[in-house]
Image (cartoon, grey):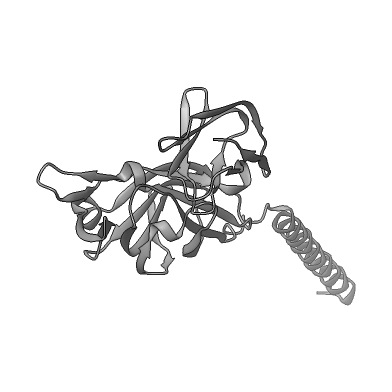
């Protein structure tokens, strides 16, 4: 074969090799471009800080002791145990605007369907200077289940207040014993308001109710005649004071409650 023919063949081989290399580079560029344009996988939801406080609407007892052992949250079909401040709580220490933190945690769900309180056996009620054991069979076996419908946004802290109504939750049985049939409201504190006032007479046993649209919320005045009803949805309320004899019932109408604010009633004459 002549030198001229060898030159032509070599030139053709070089051209083919260059073509293959350019084709590979083009495919690589296309592949790389596809990878860069691919939508990244979404990051997992940020943990949602969650805080649960407990308060009480007091009743005609000297003390109501609740043995709290654990707090569980159910959301999106999954259950999470919070970090509970386990212990025995006197609900009557948590009245008229006073509350206490009972559990904290971080949730990775976007909905909360249930809050479950698990109680121990050391529950009691004190009335007339006598301490009675407080039967709580459902709370010890399956817990106090509070149904909620709460939508969560990742990374935002949520505060929930459990309003434990002692006056409606304690049931005196026919044999002189007492049992717990809990009436508990769950309140998102950022979505409610409150009503606060004072009676003209201190030391009077009085129940105060706030009614709106057929729903009533109640509390009792403390020894100074002061009271506060928290966790009220926004709206117009009728507030009624039911004092013991010989004092008279007093009613206030068109009391406006707004979110995040406390409506002051001043001194109410009884």
Q: Write the residue at 64% across / 29% down.
A: 255
Residue 7 position (above or below residue 119) = below
In this image, 151 relative to 257: left or right?
A: left
Residue 240 position (above or below residue 108) = above
Spot the residue most to the bottom: 3
In the picture, which quadrant includes the N terminus?
bottom right
| Residue situated in front as seen by the camera: 147 or 219 | 219
Q: Position of residue 26 (x, y in %)?
A: 78, 59
Q: Position of residue 196 (x, y in %)?
A: 61, 44
Spot the residue most to the front: 246
Spot the residue most to the right: 4
| Residue situated in front as seen by the camera: 249 or 71 | 249
In the picture, which quadrant includes the C terminus?
top right
In this image, 106 relative to 87: left or right?
A: right
Q: Write the residue at 66% across / 56% down.
A: 40
Residue 195 picture quarter: top right
Q: Write the residue at 71% across / 58% down.
A: 31
Residue 222 position (above or below residue 14) = above
Q: Position of residue 111 (x, y in %)?
A: 49, 46
Residue 266 picture quarter: top right
| Residue situated in front as seen by the camera: 186 or 240 | 240
In this image, 236 relative to 96: left or right?
A: right
Q: Write the residue at 52% across / 22% down.
A: 213
Q: Position of residue 14 (x, y in %)?
A: 83, 70
In this image, 72 relative to 31: left or right?
A: left
Spot the residue most to the left: 175
């Amino acid at each position: 074969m002549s030198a001229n023919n060898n030159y032509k063949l070599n030139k053709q081989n070089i051209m083919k090799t260059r073509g293959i290399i350019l084709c590979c580079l083009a495919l690589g560029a296309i592949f790389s471009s596809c990878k860069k344009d691919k939508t990244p996988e979404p990051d997992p939801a940020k943990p949602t800080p969650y805080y649960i406080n407990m308060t009480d609407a007091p009743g005609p007892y000297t003390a109501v002791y609740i043995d709290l052992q654990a707090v569980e949250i159910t959301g999106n079909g999954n259950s999470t145990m919070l970090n509970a401040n386990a212990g025995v709580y006197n609900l009557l220490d948590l009245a008229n605007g006073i509350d206490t933190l009972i559990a904290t945690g971080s949730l990775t769900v976007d909905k909360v369907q249930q809050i479950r309180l698990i109680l121990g056996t050391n529950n009691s009620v004190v009335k007339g200077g006598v301490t009675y054991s407080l039967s709580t069979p459902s709370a010890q076996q399956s817990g106090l289940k509070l149904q909620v419908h709460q939508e969560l946004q990742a990374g935002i802290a949520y505060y929930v207040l459990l309003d434990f109504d002692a006056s409606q939750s304690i049931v005196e049985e026919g044999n002189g014993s007492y049992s717990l049939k809990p009436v508990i409201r769950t309140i998102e504190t950022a979505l409610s308001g409150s009503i606060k006032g004072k009676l003209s007479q201190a030391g009077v046993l009085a129940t105060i109710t706030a009614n709106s649209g057929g729903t009533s919320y109640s509390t009792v005045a403390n020894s100074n005649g002061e009271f506060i009803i928290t966790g009220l949805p926004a709206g117009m309320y009728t507030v009624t004071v039911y004092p013991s004899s010989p004092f008279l019932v007093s009613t206030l109408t068109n009391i406006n409650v707004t979110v995040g604010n406390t409506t002051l009633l001043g001194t109410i004459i009884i």
